[in-house]
Image: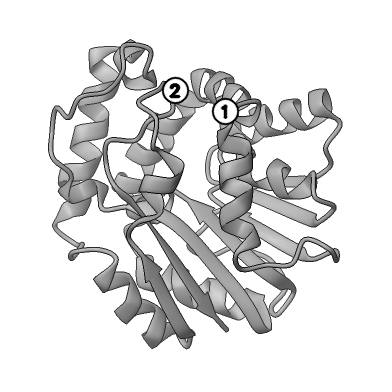
Amino acid sequence: MEAIKEKVFEYWSQRAKDFAIQRIREFSSEKHELWLEEFERHIPMDKKLKILDVGTGTGFFALLLAAKGHQVTGIDLTENMIEEAKKISRETGLTADFYVMDAENPNLPVKSFDVIVSRNLTWTLPHLAQAYQSWHRLLKPNGIFINFDGDYCHEKKNQPVPENHAHKSLPGELMQKYEEIKDELREGQRIRPYWDRELLQQAGFRDIETDKSVWKRIYHNFDEFYNPTPIFKIVAYA
């Protein structure tokens, strides 16, 4: 594993436990319906679809969509995250398949998914162009890719967050790792989501839409789930 991926792996491995706790709370909050509303803008919920959640973490998106009857697979580089996702799946009774796998080059059958979704993953990928090409190959013709992310490598530092925000309780050493990851990745990234649009076009995607206002719909409350970095949504078709 290359050095930057090792750093990302170590950071999220250490965060898996507290991340799982926060995602469970988010699943039971108003955010559950807000995220579903975003998906319902683009994919039907009245028929069973094969969905891949890349960078699933502890399985929030995967289980959210599994609860609507879809056949969902979640992959993540971090074994600790996948173990937490499987645990939450068992505890909630929601069924999804979870695998430890590199999101940039997933070992999955080509043209096998109707939908690919992702949340706060793509900013961590040192080879984003390769990832988009890989995901395009995994989608069926006319399949849809929905990506929620932020331009984290260019975000402002020390933005205000609530006292019960997850970053408030992180040890200084972990926050330092987070900043180091951003510093190292920043050199290879351009301003997003404009850069993403170019890479997606090069990967063969079409009808690419970007929505920079989605953060206002999801994070309108200054609560523990608040994200101070404005997230965007990208929707593209294979």
User: How many marks do you count on the picture?
Assistant: 2
For the rendered model, the colour scheme is one colour
Quarter location, residue 72 = bottom right
Q: Quick one: label 1 or label 2, which is nearer the N terminus? A: 2
Indicate the quadrant where residue 126 lies: bottom left
From where the camera sits, is residue 56 visible? no
Tell me which residue sits at (46%, 72%) in the image: 132
Q: Are marks 1 and 2 in contact (CB under 8 Å)?
A: no
Q: Which residue is mark 1?
A: 26
In terms of depth relative to the viewer, which is nearer, 155 or 2? Answer: 155
Residue drawn at (55%, 71%), measured in percent from left and top?
135
Query: Residue at position x 62%, y 37% from top?
Result: 32
With 134 as the anchor, is 175 left or right in this view? Answer: left
Q: Nearer the viewer, residue 33 or 170?
A: 33
141 left or right, relative to 214: right
Does 7 appear above or below 199? above
Secondary structure, mark 1, is helix
Q: Amino acid at mark 2?
A: Gln
Q: Amino acid at mark 1?
A: Glu
Relative image position of residue 104 (x, y in whole percent): 48, 62
| Mark 2 residue crowding within 10 angstroms, few (<14) / some (14–19) / many (20+) | some
Q: Is residue 202 above or below residue 105?
A: below
Which residue corresponds to mark 2? 14
Q: CA distance from mark 1 to mark 2?
A: 20 Å
Horizontal relation, residue 184 to residue 3: left or right: left
